[in-house]
Image (tube, rainbow, N blue to C red):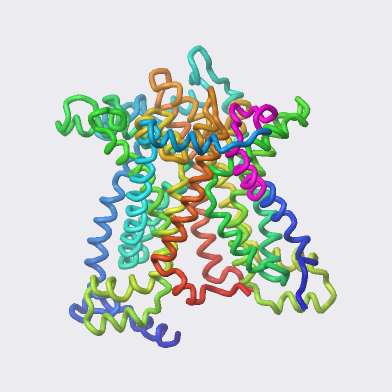
Amino acid sequence: MRPRLGPAGFFLIPALALILVFYVAPLILSVYISFTPLKNWNLDRYLGETSLDNYRALYSLMRFDPDFQKVLKTTVVFTTVTLAVNVLGGLGLALALYFMDERLSLPYRVLWLLPRMTPVAVYSLLWYYFFLGSPEGTLNSILMRLGVIDEPVQWGTDPRLLPEMAWAILVIVNGFVGVSFGMIVFYSALHNIPREQVIAARVDGASTLQLMRYVLIPQIRWHIVYVTVWQLLSLLTTFAHIFLLVEWGVVDRYWGQNLALYVFLKAFSGGESYQGLAAAAATILVVIGVVLGFIALRVMRFREMMVEPKGELG
Amino acid sequence: MSLVSRLRGLRPRPPAQRGAWDVETIRRGRLSLVLAIVLGLAGLPLILLYSMLVLSSFADRMLSGPDIFEARYSLDNWRLLFEGRLAPASGQTYTTRDILMIIANTFIVALGVTVVVVFVSVLAGYAFSRMRFWGRTRLMEFLILLHAFPGVALIIAVYAVYVWSLRFVPRDWFVPYTVLYTVLARAALEIPMSIWLMKGFFDKIPWEVEWSALVDGASRFTVWRKIMLPLVRPGIAALAIFAFLAGWEDLIYVHVFLYPHVKTLATYIEEVLGTGTETAYLPVVAAAGTLYLIPTIVFFVATQRLLLQALSGGVKA
């Protein structure tokens, strides 16, 4: 006999209610809004009519609007480069920490976790000041002392340095936050590898590099897949740090903006705001995320690895 | 397992015995040193950034590295911060009351998120760990999917519902309502992962403890409240800290829902810098940033020990 929700219902209702109100309903509503011409949050006036206009508008923006094209290019470059930095950097950090003395590695783990633990506003403040275009900015000040540059450089907004410098700033700022995720997951995965295998490899005379290449990395393949897919989806939709960098003028308005931030600013900017258009862009973002996620899982043969027991569920 | 522990038992060797190296940790000392130096260099920007922030909060100017020995240090910035002598927009200054309100608001949001997340996830985590019901596995997978779901796609609709609901809220209740809505919306983002975390903690508790109580005729709720809750206390603490930090550091939700009626430390810093650095005295902003940073560091250090304790058998029946 199949037990029904029954007594479990009491324990589950608060969670299910929150999920219904703040995930499921908004998701459906979001897709609906993407077909309406909603703007300036005038719900009474615009929510009645539906059309494909927003998607048409996005298509023509993509073809003819140079600013939107900048945003799309930035999204692609930012997502791929930061993803590579996060996964490879996290793997490198975890391996380095693994080979280090346990007591020595602790302060490093804390250091690399700091950006993740720092409030977004403070973390952006740190980098705002680091890349500040005036002579007081940390980077300008140091380079001027060293005699590398004669006058202060507007790192993220100087037209001669665009778009690469703006992209570099985005990757650096987000990369320092992102690597710690891979670091934690890989570090604990490495410590779960049976020690006999490491010892056996050492007895056979494996060098540290060979040990990594043939023993350690193959063992944590599942975790590499997991971190890659997870980070891909997060990076596609992250925008909190970039939001402040753009708002404070650290990076160029369009070369420093990814699609997620574009959606956010379209819906929530102070003057005219276009929620219908933003919802359409958000819906496309979700579709891209789902498709890329599935492709990534397929390419990295997630299914085969799922056989590996990952704790009980049933 | 016994093989491992026996081999591990062999490990400590007198370091003077050169050549008698350990099979597992071949030349570990030198490798350790090299790695430490490399990692230290890679982390240098971070060390630089954080130390500049904290030092600048005491200095008479923003420090940028080479000038740390030239500046004069005092508590003036901190005094200015608490006096609210900082112009958010031209011709406007905060007052002492504003600053204390801003700090209090940040605490209210963070504590609100903590209460909601802990209450909801401790209930649901128990059900997922201990009870059998239709769709359990599928729901668990669904939660993971939800966590991966882009927040930016949700916030438009969440805000639309909020705008719509405002028409039913009396004017006097506006501020409490917005705070409550923000707390619930922000807490919801943490729910999927928190339920997974709590389920893990409940899973570690042996079934026998619960059976004996159930056999004695206790109800599921009594078992949960009287027996399970005390046992998962380390889990609840870890969860509470994560939830508090999420609420404490949030920028997007407080920016969208609360600004400018209710200001928190995040929107305060955003506002001051948004008006342009010409008007803002940056060392005070550094002090505000440091103040905002302190609880997260304190909690982080606390979590490290707590999590270790929880992982290394702190949860015992």
Residue extending furthest toward the left: A147
Q: In terms of depth relative to the viewer, which is nearer, B85 or B45? A: B45
Q: Where residue A190 sits: x, y (%)? A: 39, 70
Q: Where residue B204 sits: x, y (%)? A: 61, 72
Q: Where residue B291 sits: x, y (%)? A: 49, 36
Quadrant where the N terminus of chain B is found in the figure: bottom left
Q: Residue at x 74, y 68 (%)?
A: B227
Image position of A127 (left or right of B180):
left
Image position of B218 (left or right of B99):
right
Is any atom of residue B54 visible in this view? Answer: no
Q: Main secondary structure of the magenta part?
A: helix
Where residue A191 sits, quadrant-wise, is bottom left
- Range covered by the magenta-colored residues: A22-47
Q: In terms of depth relative to the viewer, which is nearer, A89 or A227? A: A227
Please say whether residue A46 is one of the residues in the magenta stretch.
yes
Residue extending furthest toward the top: B91
- A110, above or below B315, in the image: above
Is any atom of residue B179 visible in this view? Answer: yes
Image position of B120 (left or right of A210):
right
Q: Where residue B277 sits: x, y (%)? A: 39, 22
Image position of A67 (left or right of A283):
left
How many discs appear?
0
- B48, above or below B193, in the image: above
Q: Residue at x 27, y 77 (%)?
A: B14
Please say whether residue A84 is one of the residues in the magenta stretch.
no
Quadrant where the C terminus of chain B is found in the figure: bottom right
Q: In terms of depth relative to the viewer, which is nearer, B247 or A99? A: B247
Q: Residue at x 32, y 56 (%)?
A: A89
Q: Residue at x 61, y 24 (%)?
A: B97
